[in-house]
Amino acid sequence: MTALLEQVETPPAWVDPLMLHSGDAVSLSITPMWFGLRAITSALTHTYASPATARLLRRTDKPRQTVARRLAESRVWARQTIRPGGLLRGEPGYVTTVGARLRHARLRATALTDWDSGGPALPIGRLDVARTWLGFTLVAHHALAAVGIGTTSEEERHLYRYWSCVAHLLGLDEILYRPVVDHAGACHLRDLLDAMAPAPDGTSRTATAAVIGAHAHATAHAPGAALYEDELRDLIHCLLRRSLGGTAADRLGIPDVAAAAGLMPLNKTLNRQARYWQTFFLATAQTARRQAAEEPGPEPEPIAAVLPLGVALRRRSSTPAA
């Protein structure tokens, strides 16, 4: 524990304190609804594409409930991490990131024990943690770009500088993440990891279906929901296929839903136009980030944690009194 604290409490020389105080300005500019629906779901889907990670669900009797909890925890962690000052020592994003590192260590210890006993599981290593890191950077923002929410070259550089601090807290070796300064570098790292990782298997497909089902169920049963659970599931299927590509989606068992795909070009155009005007002026960009940072904090219950809070609150406030 002493070695751990010495490492995480000694920021590398390249860390910019002003950047930590500002937070992940790129992710904060994303509407909370799309951040939850696209970024988090895509990141977890990418993570569970690794059979080693997906096999962890076999340790539980209720995999869907476990996935729902992980989905909620991931959204809480991501929101705490990107907030201004969230990665400063002792702040929520810092604490939850180091806590995730400790959980990974415990999972590795358990997996090694099972392996020594003849079990099929292998411990999650640095490469799987790197996949998770790419899930919340490259994959999440590729997913957002698929619905018209793109990033500039300058925003990409800022994004990876900020998330390099997250990688440091997670204990990743700098040789894995420091060369990554934009999406092109992240794509190169992803291709290297994919070349060394087994292809998604039945366990990966089961985990992917559980992530999609848990997110659709939580959002459909949240206050102010506008779509039914099956409609949300179709929408998520369509969004994932557009961001992951047809081949990767087929390997994960994500069906092609033609009905939901019909609305995607219009949706993408509207998002692109909204983001253009949102970031056209410095004042509007700062307002958007401040509103995202001031979103009500996620509740401990999974349904509340994955609810796109901003949208639900606006709907309730706009509903005329009876």
Image (cartoon, rainbow, N blue to C red):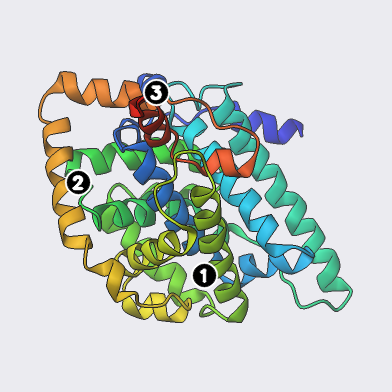
Of badges 3 and 1, nearer the viewer stands 3
Q: Residue at x 13, y 52 (%)?
A: 269
* Image mark count: 3
Residue 176: tell me if it is visible. Answer: no
**Residue 321 shows which numbered tag?**
3
Image-based side of 294 in relation to 197, left or right: left
Mark 2, secondary structure of its residue: helix
Label 1 Cα neighbours within 10 Å, binned few <14 / some 14-19 / many ≥20: many
**148 above or below 5?**
below
Q: Name the residue type under label 3.
A: Ala
Spatial CA span between label 3 and label 1: 46 Å
Residue shown at 74%/72% (left/top)?
A: 121
Could you tell which of marks 3 and 2 lies nearer the N-terminus?
2
* Mark carried by residue 230: none
Report the amino acid beneath label 1.
Ala
Could you tell me which quadrant the N terminus lies in?
Answer: top right
For mark 1, what is the residue? 49
- Element type at marker 1? loop
Residue 78: x and y in percent read 49, 39
Three-letter amino acid code at the position of disc 2: Asn
Residue 239 appears left or right of 251: left
**Label number found at residue 271:** 2
